Image: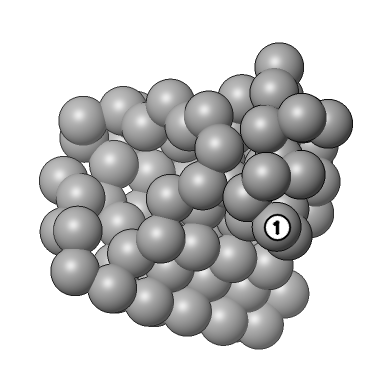
Amino acid sequence: MIEQDNIIIQGQVDIDQSAIISPFTIIGYGGDPSEIKERHKDNITTINSGVWIGPFVTIYHGAMIGADVKIDPYSRIGHNTKIGNGARILYGA
């Protein structure tokens, strides 16, 4: 479920329908959108099934979030980071 209000999606992003994304979240962040298109056009940000993303989370381009992951509020997931299935990212990490 994606509530489009107050969610920013940049670049190429693949989000499973069952993922829950809270408001004030940025997915696929990488700076200037024109730079993303040129330098990182093959870098797909992936959010798998059963993922819960809290508010005020930034997920940078190329990240891969495994199934059933919980990301607490105010966390940042770096460029090309891979998070395995069932992981939990704690508040502000």
Q: Which residue is mark 1?
A: 32
Residue 87 visible to the viewer:
no
Q: Which quadrant does the C terminus fall into?
A: bottom right
Residue 80 in which image quadrant: top right
Above or below 20: residue 55: below
Q: Residue furthest top?
A: 42
Instruction: Report the coloring of the rendering.
Output: one colour
Residue 21: x and y in percent read: 31, 57
Q: Quadrant of residue 39?
A: top right
Q: Residue at x 56, y 81 (%)?
A: 74
Image point (62%, 73%), residue name: 75
Q: Is residue 74 above or below residue 63?
A: below
Crowdedness near tag 1: few (<14), some (14–19) or many (≥20) residues, C-alpha within 10 Å: few
Relative horizontal placement of residue 93, taking residue 91 as reference (left or right):
right
Q: Is residue 18 visible?
A: yes
Callout 1: helix, strand or loop? loop
Q: Nearer the viewer, residue 20 or 15?
A: 15
Total label count? 1
In the rendered view, does 2 fall on the left or right side of 80?
Answer: left
Q: Nearer the viewer, residue 63 or 35?
A: 35
Q: Which x, y percent locates residue 63?
A: 68, 38
Query: Residue lying furthest front in this view?
Result: 34
Q: Amino acid at mark 1?
A: Asp
